[in-house]
Image (cartoon, rainbow, N blue to C red):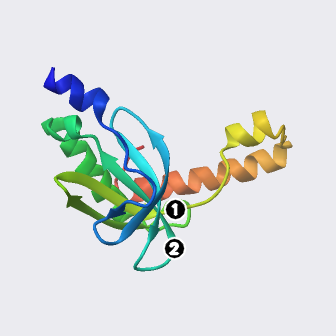
Amino acid sequence: MFNLILKYGERPFKPGTQIKERYVTKQVLGMGSYGISYLAEDQKTGKPAVVKQLRSYKAQSKKGLHSFHREAEILSKIHQEAFPAFNEAFQWRKKNFIAMEYIDGETFEDLIFIKKDSYDEKESFDILLKVLMAVKNLHEKEIVH
């Protein structure tokens, strides 16, 4: 019963919650089985940030906690415009967090299916080249995605 409460009863922080005396939550960006992502204001820089919170029941699992720490480690090694800049990984109120740069934008899914944008062959290849260069950067750091 306790594990069910941890898994399904964990609520996101309300807007205005100050996390680690640095990040003030603005809104929930998304919730999944592994965690909750918030749009926050970084009080240190005055810029928007994404703060990812690992769900408590995942933190109790060795595998879940390891995956979360591995994500922070990988993100801290990547320094390229295509990826958000890593701020820090930390614990606050017995919860695990990763904070990173917020990159504003739209997904291709939104652009194509909602906005009805279309791309010709040259535009498509230009976009693909940017994606491939980002993946190449990961591979050069021995990161497979």
71 vs 27, nearest the viewer:
27
- On residue 79, which mark appears? none
Q: Which quadrant holds residue 57?
A: top left
The residue located at (67%, 49%) in the rendering is: 106
Q: Is residue 48 above or below residue 59?
A: below
- On residue 102, which mark appears? 1
Q: Which quadrant holds residue 54?
A: top left
| Residue 21 placement (x, y as % from top left) | 30, 71
Which three-letter amino acid code belongs to the residue tagged 2? Lys
| Residue 128 placement (x, y as % from top left) | 67, 47
Query: Is 62 displayed left or right of 140 in the figure?
Result: left
The residue located at (48%, 62%) in the rendering is: 84
| Residue 66 placement (x, y as % from top left) | 19, 44
Query: Is 132 displayed left or right of 12 in the figure?
Result: right
Which three-letter amino acid code belongs to the residue tagged 1? Tyr
69 vs 99, nearest the viewer:
99
Which residue is tagged 2?
47
The residue located at (40%, 34%) in the rendering is: 32
Q: Earlier in the sequence, mark 1 or mark 2?
A: 2
Q: Count the marks.
A: 2
Figure quadrant of the C terminus:
top left
